[in-house]
Every structure is written in structure tokens, then in C-alpha cells.
Image (tube, rainbow, N blue to C red):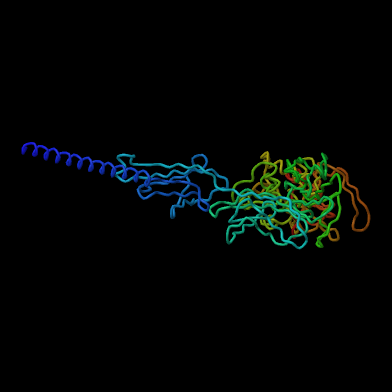
Amino acid sequence: MAIESAYRGAASSGQVLKRTLLGVGATALLAIVAVAVAALTLSGVTLAGDSSALARVSVQPLGGTIERIQAFGPGGRSVPIAMHHGRLTPLKRLAPGEQVSVDVEVRRPGWLGWALGSQRTEHLTLRAPAAHVTEHWMTVAAGSPVRVSFDQAVSTVAYGGLGSLTRHALGRARSSISLGVRPATGALEIAAAPRSWETIGAPTQVSWFPPSSSPVMVSLPAAGTRIAPATAIYLTFSEPVSEVLGSRRPRVTPSTPGRWREANSHTLVFTPSGFGAPLASTLRVELPRGVAVTAGAGGGLRTTSQIEWTVPPGSTLRLQQLLAQAGYLPVDWHAAGADVARTPSKEVQAAVEPPAGSFAWRYPNTPQQLRALWIPGQANVITRGAVMKFENTNNLTADGVAGPTVWHMLLAYAIAGKGLHEGYSYVYVHREVPEGVTLWHAGRTVLTAPANTGISGAETALGTFPVFEHIPEGTMSGTNPDGSHYKDPGIKWISYFNGGDALHNFNRASFGTPQSLGCVELPLAASAEIFPYTPIGTLVTVEA
């Protein structure tokens, strides 16, 4: 009995120990499972979009440490990123709608890394937010402010005329912007940036009209303003174009290369091509039917089928730049920045908005008399003579006036890189006895010779004049101081520069004193040598 009892006691103790060991093992297993579950549930990393930043990254308590954040724009361009409280903000402005890829690399804790890997990378591709105008054509009662609404809140807006937007930072993001009280009809371009770290987006046009029973039209640029030759013209109607004009299109005068297109259901756009509207012209658009437009400062409406703009003349400064580039002036011109692109639109734009740059004399020993005549940016006789020479070279009437044809040809020269490949000539005459003439060409004095100027009562006028007629031989006639008339045939090497005054040969016994009736008389050999250097446009200065 005693032995059996002892055996039973030992067996019972073994069972207890076994149960104890099983319990401890189960507890340990549960602990391991709990730790694993906690590691899995508390080691997450989240990368998502954000309402104010570009994106937001969140690392759970057991997730580890962020080691690297990278962002890339289109074409793999690196985008620097700053992180503050988990928000990722670009350090370089993004364009609205621009696609960005963000990679966040996290290093897990060492004790967790052996099971789940030492690193985790989250990737997110998103676009920078873009705001769009919800209503492009608005009816606005007189005296009410014009309000522009967007499909989401914006932090910055810019608005104004074509190509001249003014930026306005808003105190807080909002989806509706007041432009204040405006004229009864109007149009402008507006652009916006939803986030402070974005650039302003692409502009879009908005137009407003007063309540009216008939179609109302607004133009951009505003009718009656000055426009550049290549400026696009927008005509926006309060009703769809198809209802106002049908399939007919307006007519542009004077004739201007370009085409009409419908930018949207309410807007027609005329885009000039080539050199656009003629310089110094009044550009008119004639509509197929009358529409209502604003009638002056009062804000009322009137019906019309014609609107117009003023195209300014070409700038004198740009005229000089082009003449210098083409070799018709004694100066060269150098742009301060990049040269004007050799395209019609860029050249014609530069004609009214000349680029910055500087002029320099082509020759180091240019006569002081000629230097004194040069005034950049202002009309002067040097410029007039150069225009005359350009006109004569291109078989135009040499009147020295840079009209539309001259401008058109000068712009064509600039685009083609054409120029005059010869030196600049200048003649100056001294009326002080002994009288004489000096021919200067391309930096050197070619000839000095005695000359005769006008007698008392028929003096050769002082001043500088461009040659306007150039003939190898002709008949000269006029009136003597006593009222009698003269007619001298067979006069050689004639260059008229001021009325009837000319450089020419005349047979005299002597030269160097006043003997003519206003002309500058020269010996035959001297006049023959000077003649090839004095084509139309050459300047002649007569000094005391």
C-alpha cells in the first residue's frame, strides 16, 4: 500500500509540472503573438495627400525613423521638400496641375528589422491642385461688384488686361474673389494658385455684361485703346456666338493677315499672323450684325456693328536700331540682352517696344560735325538720310518717311539678316574763304578740294541736308538775283541736297570763293570723284 501511494504521488506531481510547463509555454506564445501583432499594427507608415501641404507622412510608434524624402517632377526633375509636423511642402514653387512623385524611406527598429526588413519605402504620385473659374460669362447689375468664383479655394490671384496681370495675395484662402465695381461691360484675364507654394496658373478670360434684352459684346483689349500689330483680339458675347453671328465672321480692315477661331461658345478670337496689323493704322472690326456695347463713361449701351483700335507707329529708337543693323547708319547697335528673335511676331513687337541696347560709332575718327547730329531715340537728319538711302536702294520713293512699306521691308531685312555692305559717306562744305569741300568715307578722308558757294543774295544755306536727287548729267536752270533767268545744259555729276542747291561740276577760272547761285561748284576731277560717294540719302553739311 505504501509503495502504491508513493507512486501515485509522484505521478500526480509530474502531471502538475507538465501542466505548469504547458501553461508557461502558452503564455509565452501568447506574448510573442501579442508582440508580433503590436509590431504589425503599430509599425505602419502612411503617405497621402494633404489639404494645405503637398502631402502628409505619418509614422506609427513602432514604424521607425524617416531617413530620406525625395520628390520628382516631370522628366525626373528633383523637387526639394521640407517636412514640418509630417507635412511635406515644396521649397520650389510648383505649377498648378503639375504631377509630382514622392518617395519616403523609413528605417525600422533593429529588433523589428530582422523580421520585416530594415527599410520600408512608401511611394505616392499626385498632382498639385489647380483651380478653375466656374462662370466665365456673368450678368452683373449696375453698381454691383464683379465676383469671380473658383471650384476650390485659392490663396493667390492675378488679374488684368492681356499679358499684364497684377498679383494679389489673399489674407486667407477663398473660393470667391471680388473685383470691385467695374464698368457696365468688361473682360479681363484671371489666374489663381490654390496653395501658397504654387505659381500662378494659366490665365483664363472672364467677361461681364449688364442685363439686356439684346446680345451684348465686350472686347479684349478694350475698344479704342492702343494695341501692338500682333495683338490678338477677343470678342466675347453675352450669348453664344452661333446665336449672335451664325456662321459669319467679322471683317478686319485694313487688310491684316490672320484668322478667326472660336475660343469657346461665347468668344471669337482674331489672331494676326505675319507682321500683323499695319503700323500707324486704325484697325477696325466690322461685325455681320449690330450688337450692344458700352456707350462711354455713363455705362449705358449703344448698338454698333464696328469697333476699332489704334496701332501705334514704329518707334524711332527701333527704326534706328534696324537701320544700324542693316548698315545704313554710321553707328552700330548692340542689344543689352538676347537679340530679337527673327520672326515676324517678335520683330513687329520690337518695333513698338524696342529692346534695350547701345549704339557705338562704326569708325574711330568720325567727323565731329557728323557726331553732333546723332541723337538716339529722336528724329534727326542722320536717320532721315538713312531712310532715304534705304528707300532708294529698295526702289521706293525716297522721301525719308518711315511709312508702313519701309517698316515692312526693314523688318523683312532683320528677319533675313540682310544688310548694306559698304562704308558710310559724309560730305561737309566750308563757306569760310578759302572755301572747300571734304569727302569722308568709312573712317578716312577721301578728298579735300576747293569749292565755290553762293554769292551775296544767293548764299548756300547753312545746315545739314540729305541728297535727294543724283544724276550724272543734266540741265540746271533758275533765277538770278537780278530777276533774270538762266539755263545751263550739260552740267555733270549733280547731287541735289537742298532745294536747287547741289554738288556739281562747273567750269570756273578759279575755286575757293563765293561765285555760285547757291550750289557748291567743284572742279571736274573733284566732282567726278565725289559723285559715286553721294547717292540719295548721303548727308551734306554746309558750315560757316
Camera-side residue: 22 or 359? 22
Residue beneath the point at 65% across and 58% down: 177
Camera-side residue: 494 or 30? 30
Camera-side residue: 284 or 542? 284
Q: In this view, does 244 lie to the left or right of 29?
A: right
Q: Is residue 324 left or right of residue 110?
A: right
Residue beneath the point at 55% across and 51% down: 198
Q: Is residue 97 visible?
A: yes
Residue 362 percent across, percent down from the top left: 63, 49
- Report how many numbered discs are placed on residues in the image: 0
Camera-side residue: 339 or 6? 6
Q: In this view, does 248 lie to the left or right of 12?
A: right
Q: For the view shown, which residue lies furthest in the left direction?
A: 2
Q: In which quarter of the image is the N terminus?
A: top left
Query: Is 142 drawn above or below residue 10 in the view shown?
Result: below
Residue 39 percent across, percent down from the top left: 34, 45
The image quarter containing residue 475 is top right
Q: Can residue 532 be seen in this view?
A: no
Residue 260 percent across, percent down from the top left: 76, 41
Q: For the view shown, which residue lies furthest in the right direction?
A: 484
Residue 310 percent across, percent down from the top left: 78, 52
Q: In which quarter of the image is the C terminus?
A: bottom right
